[in-house]
Image (cartoon, rainbow, N blue to C red):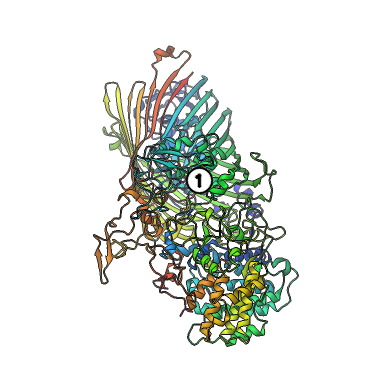
Amino acid sequence: MRKLQLLVLMLILLPALAFSQGGRVITGRITDDKGEPVSFATVKVKGSKTAISADENGFFRITAPENATLQFSASGSETKDVSIAGQGNVINVTLLKTNTELTAVTVVTTSLGIRRQSKELGYAAVSLNNKTLTQGKSVNVEQALNGKVSGLSVATTNSSVFEDSKINIRGIRSLTGNNQPMLVIDGAPTPLGFLSSIPPDDIQDLTVLKSAASAAIYGPDAVNGVIVITTKRGASKKISVTVNSTVQLSRVAFFPKLQKGFGGGAGEVIDQYGNYGYVPYENQQYGPAFDGSLKEIGVHLEDGSILTVPYTAGHYKDKVNFWNTGVTIQNSVSLAGEDFFVSVEDAKIKGLMPKDENRRTSFRFNGGKKYGNFSINYGLNYVLQNYDVVNEAGFSTLFPSAYNGSIFFLIMQTPSNIPLLEFKDWQNNKFAQYSNYYNEFAVNPYWVIGNIRQHGRQDDLIGNVDGSFQFTPWLKGTARVSTNLSFSNFQNTQAPVVVSDWAVANRNATQYTNRPGSVFNDEAFTSRINFDGFLSGDHAINSDFNVKYLAGGMIRQNRSKDVSVGGNNLVVPYLFNVSVRSGDAAVPLFPNNSDIQSRLYSGYGSVGFGFREWAFIEFTGRNDWDSRLLKENRSFFYPGANASVVLSDAIPALHNSKYISYAKARAAYSKSGNVNVGVYSLQATYSQPAGFPYGGNAGFTANQTIPSPDLKPEFVITKEAGFEIGFLKNRINLEATYFNQTCNNQILQVSQSSTTGYTIGLANAASFKNYGVEMDLGLTPVVKINKGRIDLKINATYNNNEVLSTFGNIPVVIGGNNGFIQTANGSPTANNIAVVGKPAFAFQLTDYERDPEGRVIVDRITGMPSQASELIVKGRSLPLWIAGITPSYTLGGLSVSMTWDYKTGHSFYSGMGSDEDFAGISARSAEYGRQRFVFPNSVYWDGSKYVPNTDIQVQDGNAGFWSVGSVNTSIGTNYFASAAAWRLREVNISYSLPQKLIGNGKVIKKITVSAVGKNLVLLVPKSNQWGDPEFNFTPNGNTFGLSSSFQSPASRFFGGSVTVQF
Amino acid sequence: MAAIAITGCQKHFLDVNDDPNRVTESNITPELIFPQAAHATGVRQASLNFRFANNWMGYWANSGSFAIDQTETTYNIDFPFGDPLWQNHYNVLFDLFQTNRKALAKGDSVLTGAAQILSAKLFQELVDIFGDIPYSQAFHNDQYRQPAYDKASAVYASLQQSLDQAISFMQKTERSSFSSVDVVTHGDELQWIKFANTLKLRMLIRQSEVAGFNPATEIAKIIANGGVLHSGETISVNPGYSNETNKQSPFYANFGLTPTGADANNLNRANAYFVNLLNSTSDPRLSRYFKTPSAGGNITGNLYGLAAGNPDGAHSSSIGPGLAGSASQNQWILTSVESMFLEAEAIARGWIAGSAQTAYENAVRESFIFLGVPNAVTAANTYMSANAIANWANAGATALSKAKFITYQKYIALAGIDPLEAWSDLRRLNMIPNTGYITVNPGKIASTVPVRLLYPQSEYTTNATNVNAEGNINQFTSKIFWQP
């Protein structure tokens, strides 16, 4: 409370700092030759030290002596002197833009939508304009950001029609909680998920505030950095219309390495020599080598027929060709006028997965108006999304057995002699019909796609209104209400499994059993209402000093409600309604049936001083009250400070330098609080397990988590320092920032022994540090060839972290590998883990028993290795280095650019690897031609010492080795590799048609055509046999580098677009 | 200013953190936990986690429809092997612990006693499988985030005391709510006491081969408190099982038919060894233990550990109607059959007065009755008189020979019902005359069944210091304390 009073006091005292000055008060507006405002131009009284800066809309107010000359200057514009003698008190000035290549980013949108000059900021902020964002024609902004901002990492976790990704700025600050940045759209805090539904075309500019320090004023959500988006708002008096059309195709790329030598068999048939025989209905591929003979596949059907195909790897490519060419068609129309912007966009995405579709239509209206001292801005964005996808999770629950995990795995486990693509018509083709499919243990994937579906719809409405009133020249009041409403529903449907009597009697009952259809419905509503009110202003104290101040408060309420119900015994086939069932309805537990509410309010303030437009310092403070904590822990305060000096203005020698055109040094310190717990997380809970209630008998079981009731917020202390320097009229720009974050009070889900009663304990139980350097280098241009030019932008980030302490020094397991668990054979244990002294996170994996030198110990008789009791801790999940290189070439209307990125220093675990070995499809499993072999780099115990093993072969070189858990598939280190990757993320070629061709801009102002390719090249080390190391089994939570069989293969994109501006 | 304005209503405005969705520690009652915990105890008895014991004991084997499990069939087990069993057992034990603690706090002695008795059964099983286990520090998560391991013998001793206390609780007057909450005996305290006594006897019998072991004190208490479970007194649970998804009786759900009438498992089939054994004695229980194959023919078993050549699921015998009878059947927790065999052995050892022969023969008859053999008593009598392995005349003269004779029949009587008990008897008395139950997998790493499971992977991950303090564990040589 005392802190709050302080803030208020500060606000009250500020006006007292002002004192009157003599002379004339001149006001006016600075615009460019097109009438667009020039933001933050410097207005100086020539021959004096008096200088002020115009506001973001170009308005300025300065007190000057009679007959003085004012000098107007702005980065990227010419400098102009205007004498006030004989002029009125209102002077409007036009500053012509100079060559754009000299323009550095000068304006950034900071806290609460307030636009600032970048030179004032004591922390790192990067702005991207619309052109940069849209040049790659990404469907969503996440994809567009990749490789363009130092310190920012976007990992695409799968290639579904939703293209989920994870965004991290400067690594992580919370071991288990949210590490993704905050999203602010037009001043309104918005759930990060919206980033994927904002059409990149609607964005005016996007600023990435990388540091927690930069965002202290935003409160707890901003601890991971902030992405600030300003959507387009009309500015020009002329109405302009832009039409854009983009088509993008995607194809499967980067497949795991597979064996092409062997077909079906798992030891059911063994000849007298111990060789595995061919089994025509097997999916495990430990059968004999392909020999080109004709062989039957499947079983003799009821009518006696059976398919016969050549026993070769001829259908190897079917595994690739199974996947569709993904098609994304995006069309948008926008209309911009002086004070409004309207756009409609439609994106239709057809996935790699056959029949998967996602369609998004959005509508945006932004407007604003100024009435004297009062101005109002408002925006409304409506996004409708409809999708229809195969429900793989539903599939694995329907057939809970070893082989029915995911479509990808169904495809991968199909032996290469099987004509997979011929089974597409599961309704009519006899051999593709459910009861007759060749495979005794797995379902026809086409049947799954046709029968187990999820379709859903989401309606999002984001609205914001803010009004501000200029009370006095030095005080403005702003009130802003923003809401995010989201209505979503989905329905999972599973058609009945209808099996012929013949198959019921003769085939594997796990698959060939009649099952009723089922349906599951979920309706969810979430809302977030945010109210901000603040007073802000600035004032020139005297000709040297000015002060900026802000104080305000915020109230936020989050609500969500989810209701779901299902029926597993539908009695009328293909009628998917819960009420048309027998037996009990399926009513899922929390959070699928829940009502959730949380509230937060805050008081905040900042005060900043500027000296002669080249030295700046700012102090910030915020106090939060959060409903999710106990009363005594609810309130917490966090302060911050940042400062910057524009050396090129401060030091005359630099100011006049021929070589150095701009130099700035900056530093910031901040503390930020973060309540990393869900709502209602302070008490242990109970729930009714499946089956209960039995009629009148209710029964509850303790859930797995025991929270510590007095959880406190996590605190992050950030220190950063950096410099920005421009050489040769800003042809060379270099920026570097060192950051160091100490993250304390980490709220952890500590894995506990099941003997404690709870497998998870929740407590403030760790600290770690996160530090690094980010660097950006821009060369504009590198070379000029006649009229053409080559530009180059390079960014690199070194980001390390180390766990400093954990609760009782117990390692903390962050997530599991539950993507795909074998029932027949254990999948390896592979976790992200936080261990004191190791990076956050290291991997924890099962490994072989090894001798002190690290060689695998094999049995002296059997030659077989064995699993070690203890798990090993190895590697790191997050990259140590991320680099992005963006060269571009421009010649007139033509521009070509590409983005390469490189990530290294980290590792990943491929869950697919173990599954592939079990099924005998991996290249690995055929490494020794399915013959006995000497386990590489192994030793055995001769009774007194370990002796290198050169001749003891494993007793079985076939399924008896490769599909066995304890010697192969349960060993996590077998599927662990470097995640280093060079990626050609994007190539973009665009061409603006010459004005002559389009009638000199009479009707059509501009036509741009472009071609784009994405993910064109992925270079990985040889040890990675499994594919894209960025994939993760879930887009949620903090696990990284744990992939599973539940993801479609990585893909490559090609596309083209046409933009017409009227 | 806005911040000041809202400070006034801070208390009310922010007090929205009471969970409107879930039952929490503050409003749960022991009456709400117990029915689930009792059901879950039944689920444990029917669990697929015990499949290894059914297989190792020669009761069941894999059908030829699937590749065999190399880990299990070579006895080359690993750390994850027993992990689900361990975690599931502790999970149920925790709900029982919570019932116990909360019922005790409310002064509900009878409910406390019921929870203690069920706990004792599960803890004993854990000791019999793993030896030393976390016990005294288990579930006290406010004090011990990494519970230490107690000596197996100490756990046994403590369980005896806990059962004594439970019996005294069960002698108190029950609350009116108890009979509806008690989905086990429906409020029959006497049955609970006999259940407790049977568990006490089972632990004593387990220690019969420990040098210098004297059960007299405990036996006296058992007798004084009404003795063990007798004919028709199987302890079972049934909260209201029915033929619906997730509501089928646990054993039936795992080994019978699905609600839609399909074979619930295509993997677990009769073991050829056991089928031959029963065929060779014309044992009518065979057709109660196993069904004829769905594709027709005689009851057919598979060879355990055979990689290729076993008949597939349709051509070999699944679990029969004596065990998987109906979707609404009671789920046994401890059978009268087992109890009566335990008593017969105790009498044969001279621990309890009476005729060992009578007790033994009644136990065999009870097995026939339990399995639903037609004309059970007559059939049992015929069986016993016709077969050397069942005729008391061949029981021998010494306590040990009688014990082996009784437990061999007990082995035959518990197929699929309590394979853990049979495994424990084997480890204690090695009473099965021929070793046809041993896996035929040529990759087997020993020709004897393991004497225990390894500690689970999850303990090495989350409770490393304590589990490592147990030293290197070998599944063939690291015996449980009661093993000779």
The location of residue B170, given as percent across then percent down, is 68, 77
> Label 1 crowding class (10 Å Cα cut-off): few <14, some 14-19, many 20+?
many
Q: Please, is residue B220 above or below residue B330 in the view?
A: below
Q: How many marks?
A: 1
Residue annotated with mark 1: A217
Q: Please, is residue A777 above or below residue A336 in the view?
A: below
Left or right: residue A952 compared with residue B241: left
Q: Please, is residue A937 above or below residue A582 in the view?
A: below
- As helix, strand or loop, the secondary structure at mark 1 comes to helix
Q: Residue furthest right?
A: B176
Q: Please, is residue A435 above or below residue A678 in the view?
A: above
Question: Disc 1 sits on a residue from what chain?
Answer: A
The location of residue A809, given as percent across then percent down, is 42, 65
Figure quadrant of residue A135:
top left
**Nearer to us in this view, B393 or A508:** B393
Left or right: residue B429 compared with residue B365: left
The location of residue B290, given as percent across then percent down, is 58, 62
Q: In which quarter of the image is the C terminus of chain B?
A: bottom left
Q: Can residue A113 be seen in this view?
A: no
The location of residue B35, given as percent across then percent down, is 66, 64
Q: Can residue A151 be seen in this view?
A: yes
Figure quadrant of residue A856:
bottom left
**Nearer to us in this view, A242 or B101:** B101
Q: What residue type is labelled 1?
A: Ile
